[in-house]
Image (tube, rainbow, N blue to C red):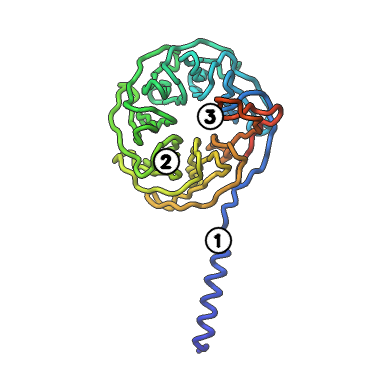
Amino acid sequence: MPPKSVITLFLALTAVSSLFGQPSSSYRVTHTYTLGGEASWDYIVPDPLNHRLFIARENRVMVVDENTGKLLGEIAGVHGAHGTAIASGSGHGFATSSEDQSVVMFDLKTLALLGRIPAAEDADAIVYDKPSDRVFTFNGDAHSSTVIDAKAGTLITNIPLGGKPEYGASAGDGKVYANLVDTDEVVEIEAKSATVTRRWSTAPCKQPVAMALDTAHHRLFSGCRSGVMAVSDYQSGKVVATLPIGAGVDGAGYDATSRDAFFSNGDGTLTVVHQDGPDQYHVLESVQTPVGSRNLGLDPANHRVFVVSAKFGPVPQGKRRGPVLPGTFALLVIER
């Protein structure tokens, strides 16, 4: 029988070997495509069926090929572009136009303008709910959601939410969810009846903005400006976990294949959180990105994360940031 010291050394070496043998995540920026163009940006919305990205750019929406970074076209006539929703069944796309409190409907193939639907003040994020075939905007200053018939392109109603909504998501089961940034809550909307059915607190996660869903386990991820993310069981309406993320979050995504959640932060980080179980999570890594890359789009078909960045000029008096410098706006692809 070998001496005790030899056995102890063997066990230690085995543990070290096992540790180094574990696969690392190592998400990284694999491609950078310079898109150029003036104006700042907001939400990045993937079109998985066609591997396109819809990127809001203040007075238009850019449509970009995910695989080549080529600009495929632009949706004009948008005044204060923020979000885009894709209703593939009807062939219609929808973009919020906050400056004139409306939603622009366009053809998904030709990108031609098809109509304009009245919304409400500060029409910001927008999502499509397939079961009801309806589009839901989240109107920040109006504290409401505008409901639109995706096929007809007509206004159905406006739902008071009792707080200022930021991003939201459809669970695919007839329920739509939105973060309320000023009340630190998640609100649940029954899509068919267009009514609020529940709400719950995201505490200790304050100022929830970004959202993503794990529909298989009924988990909802809220990225909060307080520097944490919260995981809610959206069936029970309870927070089950919180973890630290970067500062200035504005985008979130969840990949069901890798069980990784992503949070894009304005401080120049992409926080990757791994799901060990429905109620157990750990921070996998923090990927360095350009400062200001606060929005993301996740294509579940190819598991790629997309962020955008730019360089800014001097900040004019009374403004939050300077103008985008010519030729600096770029799309970054993040993957393993």
Q: Residue at x 33, y 20 (%)?
A: 159
Q: Does residue 98 appear to the left or right of 73 in the view shown?
A: left
Give the alpha-carbon distance from disc 3 to disc 1, as whole Å.
Answer: 35 Å
Residue 7 at x, y percent in the picture: 51, 82
**Label located before the other in sequence (1 or 2):** 1
The residue indicated by pointer 1 is 22
Q: Nearer the viewer, mark 3 or mark 1?
A: 3
Q: Nearer the viewer, mark 1 or mark 2?
A: 2
Q: Amino acid at mark 2?
A: Phe
Q: Check the image and report above or below for 46 versus 215.
A: above
The residue indicated by pointer 3 is 43
Q: Check the image and report above or below for 151 versus 278.
A: above
The residue indicated by pointer 2 is 221
Residue 155 at x, y percent in the picture: 40, 13
Q: Does residue 204 appear to the left or right of 300 in the view shown?
A: left
Q: Residue at x 58, y 64 (%)?
A: 20
Q: Residue at x 41, y 26 (%)?
A: 129
Q: Amino acid at mark 3?
A: Tyr
Per the image, label 2 sits on a secondary structure element best described as strand
Outermost front residue: 317
Name the foreground residue: 216 vs 240.
Answer: 240
Q: Residue at x 65, y 20 (%)?
A: 73
